[in-house]
């Protein structure tokens, strides 16, 4: 079991006045139940999976909940919708109660929570493992935040962009980890070093089937899954590209409106991230189309039955997914965009902080040149906040200055612990 960076935040949150009711959400198999049961061993664990015992919990009044279970972990809550009203009443009547809600069908869980517990519940998201978490060897081990997260928290780039990455302890380990991540992703079940490649491929295929048979059926009530399967596979082949739902519809053989709906399902179930375009400058012709990125490269490649070398778009998506997971887990106030101008200038990832922007170009190459930073120069004429620092992230093991406030850094060095 790997250490999860989110745990200290959860403990701090649940001890606060506004954290007595927490719903932990995220994709299937990201380790929600494991994390909560290990992190809160004093909380009774109640699973509502069993239809035999479910009516017994449904019959409890708010007073009985307070008396018997003043604190509890409630799993598979979406299977007993009426229980959410009971928990709401218990929390309103008894300020010393505390509950953590979980559910394997995240979409239904969120829908019911938003209907009944708006303003009362803290929603927390758990993603697949990040690089620093994958580097830990046990639950008790501590995970050091990546250089990226520490830099963004400190706001002092000069303290981070120096040294010789390949000489640093752990660089080789993170480089190997990156290779594994690009092939199999970062689901906790695949972090076991005893698993061989075929077992991992098999697990990913089973994961996709379980997702289709449970999450998608729950969300969409689809009688026929084949159109969704076609759209899902088509979209997997388009990761890292501008999302053209009309093109997706044609390729998958479905209606345009259906394509939009299916993309929404995949986003709601934490399978893809839609990277919004930045277009706040009315004086510039800027693309207003989102880019799609799968949140786990192992799942994306399993959908296509792909093995071996990754494509440039797959590499870009995998790195953006890792950045997204790390910054979401760190709870930094960051907005995520891409930039695409009418004259062809593109920025793969644009991080917006309160004080300014961090533009990032992602290259799969092992040798970076000044030309790789050409889209990062003179962005101030487009953006409405200053550029704090621009980055080119690649497989080049060197740390290079490519201009004023533009640095090329190795992915394994910048995103590792």
Image (tube, rainbow, N blue to C red):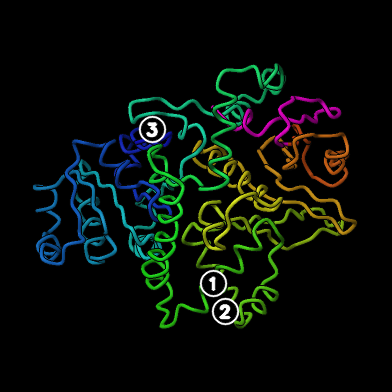
Give residue 258's mark: 2
- Rendered residue at 20%/59% (across/down): 48
Q: Position of residue 185 (x, y in %)?
A: 51, 47
Q: Residue 148: x and y, percent?
A: 62, 31
Whether residue 396 appears in magenta in the rendering, the answer is yes
Q: Position of residue 124 (x, y in %)?
A: 41, 47
Within the image, what quadrant is residue 85 found in? Answer: bottom left
Q: Which residues are magenta?
A: 393-417
Q: How dense is the environment of label 3, judged by Cα within 10 Å: few (below 14), some, or many (20 and up)?
A: many
Which residue occupies the foreground of this view, 363 or 20? Answer: 363
Determine if the magenta segment contains residue 406.
Answer: yes
Question: Tag 2, which secondary structure?
Answer: helix
Residues at circles 1 and 2 in contact by the CB criterion of under 8 Å: yes
Mark linked to residue 3: 3
Q: Is residue 336 left or right of residue 64?
A: right
Residue at the spot of label 1: 262
């Amino acid at each position: 079991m790997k250490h999860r960076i989110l745990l200290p935040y959860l403990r701090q949150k649940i001890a606060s006045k506004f954290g007595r009711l927490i719903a932990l959400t995220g994709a299937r198999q990201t380790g929600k139940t494991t994390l909560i049961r290990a992190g809160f061993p004093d909380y009774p664990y109640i699973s509502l999976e069993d239809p035999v015992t479910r009516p017994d919990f449904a019959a409890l009044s708010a007073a009985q909940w307070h008396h018997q279970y003043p604190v509890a972990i409630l799993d598979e809550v979406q299977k007993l919708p009426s229980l959410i009203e009971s928990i709401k009443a218990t929390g309103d009547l008894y300020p010393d109660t505390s509950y953590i809600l979980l559910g394997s069908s995240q979409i239904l869980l969120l829908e019911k929570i938003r209907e009944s517990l708006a303003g009362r519940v803290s929603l927390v998201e758990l993603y697949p493992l990040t690089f620093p978490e994958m580097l830990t060897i046990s639950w008790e081990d501590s995970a050091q935040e990546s250089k990226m997260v520490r830099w963004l928290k400190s706001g002092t780039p000069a303290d981070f962009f120096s040294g010789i990455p390949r000489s640093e302890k752990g660089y080789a380990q993170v480089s190997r980890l990156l290779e594994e991540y690009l092939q199999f992703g970062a689901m906790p079940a695949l972090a076991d070093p005893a698993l061989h490649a075929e077992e991992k491929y098999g697990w990913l295929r089973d994961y996709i089937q379980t997702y289709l048979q449970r999450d998608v059926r729950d969300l969409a009530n689809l009688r026929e899954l084949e159109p969704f399967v076609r759209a899902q596979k088509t979209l997997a082949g388009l990761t890292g590209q501008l999302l053209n739902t009309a093109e997706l519809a044609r390729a998958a053989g479905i209606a345009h409106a259906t394509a939009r709906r299916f993309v929404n399902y995949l986003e709601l179930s934490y399978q893809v991230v839609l990277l919004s375009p930045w277009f706040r400058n009315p004086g510039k012709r800027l693309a207003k189309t989102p880019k799609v990125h799968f949140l786990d490269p192992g799942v994306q490649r399993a959908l296509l039955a792909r093995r071996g070398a990754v494509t440039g778009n797959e590499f870009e998506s995998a790195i953006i997914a890792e950045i997204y997971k790390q910054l979401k887990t760190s709870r930094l106030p960051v907005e995520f965009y891409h930039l695409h101008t009418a004259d062809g200038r593109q920025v793969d990832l644009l991080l917006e902080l309160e004080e300014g922007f961090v533009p990032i170009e992602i290259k799969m190459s092992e040798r970076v040149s000044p030309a790789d930073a050409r889209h990062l120069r003179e962005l101030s004429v487009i953006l409405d906040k200053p550029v704090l620092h621009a980055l080119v992230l690649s497989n080049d093991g060197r740390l290079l200055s490519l201009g004023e406030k533009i640095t090329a850094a190795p992915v394994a060095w910048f995103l590792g612990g």
